[in-house]
Image (tube, rainbow, N blue to C red):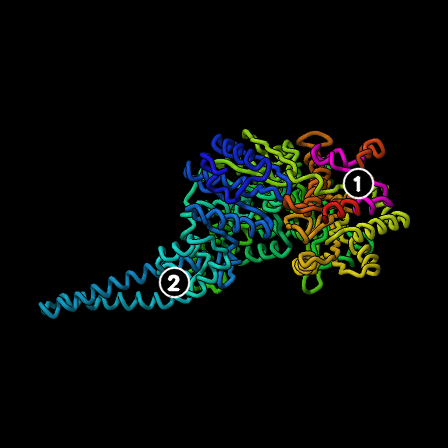
Amino acid sequence: MKGSKGYLKYFTKDSCYPNQEDAMENIHSALLKKQIVLFEGACGTGKTLSALAPALQVGKQLDKTVIIATNVHQQMVQFIQEARDIKKTNDIKAAVIKGKTNMCPHGIDYDECTVKRENTFDLIELEKDIQLKRQELKSANKNYKQSKDPELIRLRDELSKELENSEEKARNLRGRTCSELYEVLNYDSEKFRDWLFKDVRTPEEVNDFAYQNSMCGYELLKREIKYADLVIANFHHVLNQDIFSTLLSWIDREPQDVIVIFDEAHNIESAARSHSSITITEHTIEKAMSEVNEYIGQVPDERLGNLFSTLLDVVQNTYNSRFKFGEKEKIGKYWYDIRISDPYDRNDMVAGKFLRQAKEEGFGDKKQIRELLEEASEFGSKLDEFYHEQYKKGLSKVLKHSDIKYAADFLLSYMELSNNPHYYPILNVRRDQNDEIYGRIELFTCIPKNVTEPLFESVYSSILMSATLRPFDMVKNTLGISRETCELAYGSSFSEDKRLTIAASVPPLFAKNRDDPQNIETIEQILLDSIEQSTGNVIIFFQNSHEAKRYHGKLDSQLNIPVFLDEVGVSAQQVRQEFFDIGEDGGKAVMLSYIWGTLSEGLDYREGRGRTVIIVGVGYPALNDRMNAVESAYDSVFGYGAGWDYAVQIPTIRKIRQAMGRVVRSPTDYGARILIDGRFLTESPQKFGKFAVYPVFPEDEKKEFIDVEPEKIKYSLMNFFMDNSK
């Protein structure tokens, strides 16, 4: 297979899966044309290597750095292994990065680290100056002994005094520096670089190397990452604009110099949303008021504290007035949403009350309030500079940040965007450690194009890959991709005889009939039959954690094999490993989880780890105010009806498809997928009309669905596993 195509030298397998060579050829061509690649490939069909091989070739050819990012730990592990395999036969340099707090030996935050870093550089410069002064003093002493010139005595005394002052300054500065960075800056870079790029080192391996040499692994990596051809990262390294800019500065590149590959790209929208939403708590507002009082003679307007106080009053009065009977007593340690704006009409009561009350108190109209806040933000920036210097000089033990600036900047954005259909304001409350309720205003981003659109416009090219990326038009619309795209979709190339997809002919499991005794009995029997007939591990995904817990109680008492429950607050990793171990040893166990949990995607249930996946119900996300606001935002931008599809229907089907893809991960693997809900039936459009979800699946997947009566499912499974166990 190793032909004249340059990218094939990065292909490490002996042969391609069907469609893999076609995918590489198309991706290679698209990258040369600077297109954005939308790439869907069924689970276990080699998407990572299909994207990496042509990307590395184009990167070498056009001097681009390849960045591959995921939000799933298991995929990060796979990237490292793929890179190691490629490196065995190719001269590539790869670096793996994690967040600073994961690598810092002291676990301090980014800003504090920055100041210690500055002090460390200052110390090194000071030590160089001290060395020069010592040489000058030595020379002055030598010249005096030779000439006995009295003028040299004066020069020697001055140099001695300067040296003494510099040494005292250095002694004081050392306590405010990072000793691990100091060692890095005095270490032989080439020695670490040779070690780093001799293999593909994990962040943990870099940290071990650094620890053994009393250094900071994070700083070591920062110095050498610019030599990497391939950077393996997390989503936030790319989707957070500030972090991405920092990463680009480390690799000494501009956006047009990088090719970004996103794995599990169907998650980009939700990840970008989390990076663009902003919040402010009561505590921050109170600290801003205290800071105004501290600098009362210097703030641009002494009424600023009263303006923040007005905001605090509005927040507290709003949530106290909106508590229903008994609702306040239910508030716990997790943030609890209170509606302050209609998800559809966007008429924010907090912003409205704040502006009205501020005007009544003499602050003027919205324009005048904005001018005051802009002055406050500018003053806060000067305070940040002052705090920075205080910490840098050791005059403060803690690096402070201006709460005036934070509060002013938040209010400026909030007044501008709270009624914008792309955003949704929410008031959250929770209890603090003293059991007191306090509030937080959140400006939730419904459509995060402000993050994704400029990113995809600025980079040289990007590959978005996932097993569940379609429909592509939705991806382009929601992420703001306007550039020319190359759209690739490949279904499973493994033999259809190796997989069975059953749609159980049961009534739709709407919330109103999930508690129906007859439905519960039917589902329970289907689960018991399916578990009995499966030749290995069975994974069951329910609509929510409550349903998973309900059926765990029923199954655990009737089965004589291990039955695991994926619970909120319990380590999913530990439960998952025990479950995997049983399957890999040839045994059988059952795992009960829920469709929006952590086990439905990004995990490889290869071979014995999983033989049967069962989906019970459609499992839409909670249709709360946030989801309604997102739906409304999409309706307003893309037309009525798009909201339901973009915000609810398609993301849910993607989750289900991801869960179905946990089994049958290689050409030799086999497994069954069982969908228990009438809306999955091939005849559901005729039976259930607009509630049917079968039509939403891609055509190549729909053709494998087989409608089966509940009592006959065990026979279908019996025949399937008998045929594949031979």
Report the amino acid beneath label 2. Answer: Glu
Labels in figure, total: 2
The part of the chain drawn in magenta is 691-717
In the picture shown, does residue 584 fall above or below 159? above
> Residue at 61% across / 44% down in the picture?
264
Outermost residue on the right side: it is 518
Q: Nearer the viewer, residue 149 or 314?
A: 149
- Find out whether the residues at labels 1 and 2 contact each other: C-beta distance under 8 Å: no
Q: Residues within 10 Å of mark 1 (few under 14, many from 20)?
A: many
Left or right of residue 70, residue 724 in this image: right
Residue 183: mark: 2
Left or right of residue 606, residue 211 in this image: left
Report the amino acid beneath label 1. Answer: Ala
Q: Nearer the viewer, residue 425 or 509?
A: 509
Q: Which residue corresponds to mark 1?
A: 503
Where, by quadrant of the figure, is residue 568 drawn?
bottom right
Task: Assign a secondary structure to mark 1.
Answer: strand
Task: Assign a secondary structure to mark 2.
Answer: helix
Q: CA distance from mark 1 to mark 2?
A: 63 Å
Where, by quadrant of the figure, is residue 430 drawn?
bottom right
Q: Earlier in the sequence, mark 1 or mark 2?
A: 2
Residue 448 percent coordinates (x, y):
61, 40
Q: Residues within 10 Å of mark 2 (few under 14, many from 20)?
A: some
Residue 518 percent coordinates (x, y):
90, 48
Left or right of residue 515, residue 645 in this image: left
In the picture shown, does residue 703 fall above or below 169? above
**Is residue 468 highlighted in magenta?**
no
